[in-house]
Structure formats: structure tokens, C-alpha cells
Image: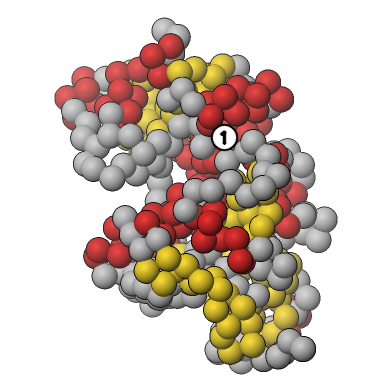
Amino acid sequence: MKDLLIMRAFHITGPQQGAVVELPNPVPGSGDVLVSVERVGICGTDVEFFNGDMAYLHSGHAKYPMQIGHEWCGTIVEVGVGVDQSWVGKRVTGDTMLGCQECERCATGYQYLCENRNEIGIRNGYAGALAELLVVPEFALHQIPDHMDATLGALVEPGGNALRSVQSAQLKKGERLLIFGPGTIGLLCALFAVEAGYEVHLAGRPGRSLEYAKEFASRNKIAGVWALDEIPALAFHGIIDATFSTEIPGRALELLEPGRRVVYIGISGEPSTIDTRTLVLKDITAVGILSASPGLAGTIEKYGNNLVNPSEIVAAVIGLDEVAAALAGSRPTGAGAGPKIHINPQK
Ligand SMILES: [Zn+2]
Ligand SMILES: [Zn+2]
């Protein structure tokens, strides 16, 4: 019989190594809640941690063993001292970024950029959501409606990044947006941009992701999907780079209409330099997006009101036992064509 005080969790134990471990149930501290995790997504950041490439492993902000998982939803089962009891039973997701709540940045709305922040499943050893139970500070919580399914709940975090990226491009209805990178973030950007009334184009390297993006486009009112060397000579009023490429950041400046905004959310493994002369001579504004934090509430609203529904990008829902294989790149049996893998830690 299962010991009720022991939970299962997935840990990355070293480069390309992972294991399901049993741990004592975590206890919510003062100001914290305990969440029974319903669903977790894994993304490129998690794969980088698994491969050992992630910059935080080299800067000292993260080390093995790690309990990853920062795209999640669940139900609150217990609250710590000082937290309102009425949270118990509520379904929530949460901000990955946990600022210190004391510094100037935290006090002025930039808690997600706090120098001393923890990040759930990412930074300073803060345990992530690939476990049956997760501790989260109350200040990081975002309630999700009961009618929102677990798939959408665990897509709020990547959605927040995408929504911020689209909003940062500052287009008007009917204007044309080009998104580089047909992965999860690029596809989510496309959905939010279509909903905002923009003419949306996606571009990427030929391959499986681009083929999926073409099918996805036909179902989601996306105007065009292009291989990188086939992008039509149109006036792009905004560009989002959601790739890992070193060259796209520079190319985006060339393709963008003067006076407009380029939004960078992708990160390459090597320096991806741009020529600031192009920036100046075309009067372009460049924007970087690190975090979903200011986009979480808006994403919950768009999903909750069925204005945006990205469920189809989730290819499979697996158990904790299958996470290591998924991080190593193998497709779960019976997986659909979408880019995102979800985990049900209770499975
Ligand atoms: Zn992620
Ligand atoms: Zn702070």
C-alpha cells in the first residue's frame, strides 16, 4: 500500500540522467500553499537542464540533482501559516519567478527580475512541479477557472510568454506580424496574434515542426507558413524571434518595417549579435522577453473565455516514469503531431 507521507518525483540526477525518486511529502512553510499537481509541461529549458547545457548550471544558479517543472497546474490541498484557508480546493497555476519581495525591483513590479529570485524548477534549487506535490508561495498563485482543463492550465506559463511577446510588438488590428520559430512559443504567439486581429505569418527551417505548423495554420487562421528562404517580400509591421538561431535576430531587423518593434524571446547557445546601425537607421525598437509573469493573468482570461485554445499542440500526456525518455528526445508511443509533451505526476 502507498505510504501517504511519501510522494514520487522526477529528478535530473546528472547530464542525460534522470530517475523517479520517493521523497517525504513537502510541508508548506509560512506564506506557502501545498498543491496536488495535476499536469506539467516540459519545454526547451528542461531539455537544456537534462543535457547539461543550461546557462544556470554553469553560473551556479542551478545544480544536480534537480526537480524540474515550471509549467503546471493543480489543486491546493493545504495552506501554511498566514495563508487564507479559503485557498484549499482552488485550482491554480503560478508564477515561476519568486522574487525576494523586499528589494526595490520587487516593490516596483519587477519581482520577476529580482536579483535574488528563486525560479520554480529552474533556479536556486527551488523544487519544480514534476512531483505529486508542490510548495508555492501564496504571492505567486493565479487561480484558474474550474472549467479550464488541465491541458490548458499547464499551458498558461508558456502562453504568458507568448502573450507578452505579441503585446510587445504593439501592432494595430489588420497589421502583419512575422514569427520566426514554429515551436511551442511560436505557435502560441501565432494564436494570440490571430485573436488580436493581426495577419500572422510563421517561418522556420524545413522539417517536422514546419510541416506541423502548416497543418496548424490551416486550422487557426494563420495567413502563411514559410521556409526561411521562401519568406515573401511583404511589409512586416512586427517580428517575433522565437528561435534558437544566431542569425535570425539580425535578419529580423532587415525584414522589419522601419519605426517598428522586434521582439526577442528565443535564446541561442552562442552570442547572436545584431548591427545597431540597422536599429538606428531604421528607427527600430528591440524588446527582450524573459518571463511570463506579467502575461499570466491575461493568458488565463484568453483561455478561460475560449478566445484562444492551444490544446492541440499537446502531443501526449505521460507519467513520471516516461519523463527521462521524453527529455532525451524520444516520442511517447501514440503521440500526436504537436510539439508539447505533458506529464500527469499522479499517473
Ligand atoms: Zn518552459
Ligand atoms: Zn527582490
> Mark 1 belongs to which amino acid?
Leu
Residue 47 pos. (x, y %)? 44, 54
Residue 16 pos. (x, y %)? 40, 61
Q: Which residue is mark 1?
A: 187
Looking at the picture, does residue 81 appear above or below residue 281?
Answer: below
Looking at the picture, does residue 236 appear above or below residue 14?
Answer: above
Question: Looking at this view, is 166 or 173 the one in front?
Answer: 166
Q: Residue extending furthest top? A: 233
What secondary structure is marked by label 1? helix
Looking at the picture, does residue 276 appear above or below residue 154?
Answer: above
Callout 1 crowding tier (Cα within 10 Å): few <14, some 14–19, many ≥20: many
How many numbered discs?
A: 1
Residue 31 pos. (x, y %)? 56, 84
Image point 26% across, 70% down: which residue? 60
Image point 49% across, 55% down: which residue? 327
Can the viewer see residue 44?
yes
> Which quadrant is home to the N terminus?
bottom right
Image point 61% across, 92% down: which residue? 81
